[in-house]
Amino acid sequence: MTSPDVSPVDLAALGTELLDAARSAPARRAARSVHAGELLRQTVLALLDGTALGEHESPPEATLQMLRGRVVLVGDGREWDLVAGTLIGIPPERHAVRAIEDSVFLLTVRHEAPASGTIADTTRTGAER
């Protein structure tokens, strides 16, 4: 069995690229998937100061790792102030993310195993969110 092609990703360079893209995007944010496996997806997101990802449901399991800037993760009646270099497990509850300054973070999400006999969809990119 051959293993898939694996190449390193320069997260610092990608973060700069995504912040540049966010500056010209109407939503003031940009994202790119850097790994899309059967059970695990990793996406780098850039949010400009004042931009938010509105409240949404939590996936089965996820982490947010700050690469640059500062965001606030807002959960059920609580908040976490996150800066570059911090990592947090996203609580299993509705939540939102608000950028306090231009920010870049790595979102890692574990998906449920696909049903037996189906093919996992790994073609969706972070830009489709």
Image: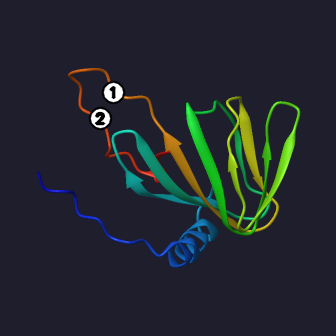
C-alpha gap between disc 2 and disc 1: 6 Å
**Quadrant of the image occupied by residue 69:** bottom right
Reading the image, the residue beneath label 1 is 114
Q: Position of residue 47 (x, y in %)?
A: 67, 61
Mark 2 burial class by Cα count in 10 Å: few <14, some 14-19, many 20+: few
Return the mark for residue 38. Answer: none
Nearest the viewer among 82 and 17 is 82
- Residue at the right extreme of this rendering: 77
Q: Secondary structure at mark 2?
A: loop
Q: Position of residue 8 (x, y in %)?
A: 38, 72
Q: Are marks 2 and 1 in contact (CB under 8 Å)?
A: yes
User: Pointer 2: what residue?
Assistant: 120
Write down the quadrant of residue 96 in the picture: top right
Q: Is residue 119 left or right of residue 57?
A: left
Most extreme residue toward the left, as rendered? 1
| Label 1 crowd (10 A; few <14 / some 14-19 / many >=20) | few
Q: Nearer the viewer, residue 35 or 101?
A: 35
How far across and how far down the image is residue 52, in percent? 73, 50
Dot 1 lies on which element?
loop
The structure residue drawn at horizontal position 47% and vertical position 76%, both measured from the top left corner, is: 10
Q: Name the residue located 71 percent from the left edge and 30 percent from the top edge.
A: 94
Instruction: Name the kind of residue labelled 2 in the image.
Output: Ala
Q: Residue furthest front?
A: 1
Taking depth in this image into account, of 63 and 25 the one nearest to the observer is 63
Residue sitting at 74 percent across and 56 percent down?
51
Camera-side residue: 39 or 53?
Answer: 39
| Sequence order check, earlier mark of 2 and 1 | 1
Residue 28, quarter of the rendered image:
bottom right
